[in-house]
Amino acid sequence: MVKLDLLAILVPALPLLGALFIGFGRRKLKGNSAGMLGTALVLGAFICSLILFLGRDGQTHIVHVFDWIKVGTMDIPFAFQIDALSLWMMLIVTGIGSLIHLYSIGYMHDDPRVATFFAQLNLFTFSMLLLVMGANFLITFIGWEGVGLCSYLLIGFWYTTPEFNYAGRKAFVMNRIGDVGMVLAMTLMFYTFGTLNYVDIMDQAGSFAPSNPLIITATLLLFLGATGKSAQLPLLTWLPDAMAGPTPVSALIHAATMVTAGIFLVVRSSVLFELAPYTQDVILWIGVATALFGATVGLFQNDIKKVLAYSTVSQLGYMFAALGVGAYSAGMFHVTTHAFFKALLFLAAGSVIHALGGEQDIRKMGGLKKTTKTTYITFLIATLAIAGIPPLSGFFSKDGILASTFQDSPFAYGILVFAAMLTAFYMFRVLFLTFFGSYRGTAHPHESPKVMTVPLMVLAVLSAIGGALNIPHIFGGHEWLKVDLGTAVEGVLGEHMALSASTEWMLMALSTALVLLTIWYTWTLFGKKTTLDGEPADMPFLKRLIAKRWMLDELYAVLFEKPFGWLSRNLFGIGETKVAVPLTVGSGKAAHGVAEWLRKMQTGNTSFYLFGMMLGVVVFLLITLFTA
Amino acid sequence: MENVMTAIRVVPLEHYLILSFLLFSIGMVGALVRRNIIIVIMCLELMLNSVNLLLVAFSAYHSDPGGQVMVFFIMLVAAAEVTVGLSILVLMKRNTDGVDMNILNRLKW
């Protein structure tokens, strides 16, 4: 028990130590030392998590670190909750995190602020661990805000470019909108349950009838927080812009870990969501809409990282759709496999960008198959995985989600299959344009160093075999992840597949066939091309709309930015200059004027002062006389 | 103690009142109009002592020793005050070669 406590504290403590040490010693740490140290500490956290994971006993352990807030009936300890769910997330965060740290040593080696970068990366890992390990909503919220802050810092890491700063600011503001929901949800839950501990809330929630308005409101607010962090409609526009950050950041934050915080939160509070069918419907349809939105926008992007960003948005939509139909283990499974293949895609894209000296436009790539062989093979594996080609990991996780949604709503299933076809299209478009045909750019491509390709290979293996974690029964598997998560997440074991085996086979064959068809179609469009057609001048309306990202940014500009700007200008023009300034400056002037006048009383003549004193005494005596 | 009380009660209370009123007024007018700082300090002492006299008189007439306690307090404060006042006086004499109180208005900013 003592060992568990110690290990559980070490897991977040190591990255925090790294953040502080590297952060304060960044001027002293030369060369690769900062990167080595940061990587080693995260790796240490991974090893601790692994020991905890291997020694798990299916119970929920609360590791009480210290009493934090203890006022009246409010008792919020600083404690960690160690169960199957948090252990699984810890493994993902520290495992993928240490690979990305390792990769960053190579990617950032000639950046002058490399130590700052690793300090922020470690701080991010710490925050994310706090988020997944917290035993109550408030600890989770600290991590929640911490990852928001680190995201802001890392997106704007190259702060000399104003657009990057705007992107960072946008991410921060968008996340704050979601946080409002989170704070309100916490307040409401404290009001309802009198505690913020997950265990206590989930215990008490059992006594509430389904569709209790309090529970529905709380879950909707929690989901608002989740949409902000996990880039769902309507709060998704920050994620594509967040690609301004260095590529490892995109891989770590915007693909593998931070964006899954929303999913984690919903799974963690699954008991509440199970009681609110209305919220589950909202989650399902927002997830489906986001999956479709991301997939369509991904079709026409030319920046390799932007395509991957919209792909992330789309995949997160899948995960939420799974949560919406109550398939928590399917959602978590997709979180895991997505962490593998999306981190791989980003890191491989980073390797390509690195090889081309910073070029991100896929129209200026091509033919890189020969020059960057490792990158090509790993990227190919990741692409096959995300497209859902059996037997790679993405196939199993995506199929799990599709089957679950088919049970609940065939219409949602149809949209998700369509989005899966679009996914295959845009991913293979990127693959073909980048690695096939002939080179269209001017740089001299070269393969990245070992420190970058080794993480790629590890992730490629994971992307390929990750599906083995949760092989469904029809393939003779035992759904290991589902059983494991079932010890921690209420309702997971109850997810039963009502579909008959033949229906399941049909669905699987259908989606795989459609995806293969799409890949063939993409090949005919882009596979053999050596030159690119220019953009046609008159695109159809729908295509133009999608290419402009459904005008979502423009819509927000009209709906929120313009009125807010107008309000601010008027508050300045009228409120500030006509009201606030006259009031404040006027009162200052009045005090000054009165003082100027009263100053004359100080003649310097001592007799005059004495006279004033006596006059005062007389006046007071008279007052006492007449009022007594 | 009783003897002192009786001795004080020999004189009627009105006389004490009139005497201290006169002493106080002299002190006040002196403090206000005179410019020699030595005189001003003496006038202040005069005012304090007129009040002392009145306190003793009332104390005796009311058979309440509290008034006499108050007198000792006032004497103590007066002693301290005179110390400060005379120090200022000495410094004034050294620095300005005079004891005119109006010289102090130079201290005005």
Image (cartoon, coloured by chain):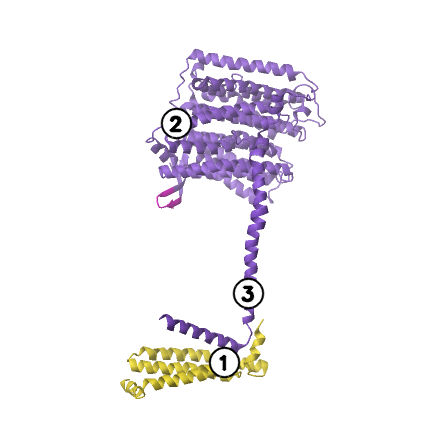
Chain colours: A purple, B yellow
Along the line of sight, which residue is nearer the eye, B67 or A30? Answer: B67
Can you give x and y, in whole percent of width and height, for residue A565 in the image?
58, 40
In the displayed structure, does residue A416 sit left or right of residue A485?
A: right
Residue pictured at 71% horizontal, 23% vertical: A440
Report x, y in % for residue B77: 42, 77
**Image disc number at residue A595:** 3
Say what secondary structure mark 3 lies in. helix
| Range shown magenta | A68-75
Location of residue A413 with respect to A559 vertically, above or below: above
Rendered image: mark on residue A274: 2
Q: Which residue is mark 1?
A: B32
Q: Which image quarter: residue A300? A: top right
Horizontal relation, residue A37 to residue A49: left or right = right
| Quarter containing the N terminus of chain A | top left
Is B27 above or below relative to A220?
below
Q: CA distance from mark 2 to mark 3?
A: 69 Å
Is residue A216 left or right of A172 when viewed as pictured?
left
Disc number lying in front (1 or 2): 1
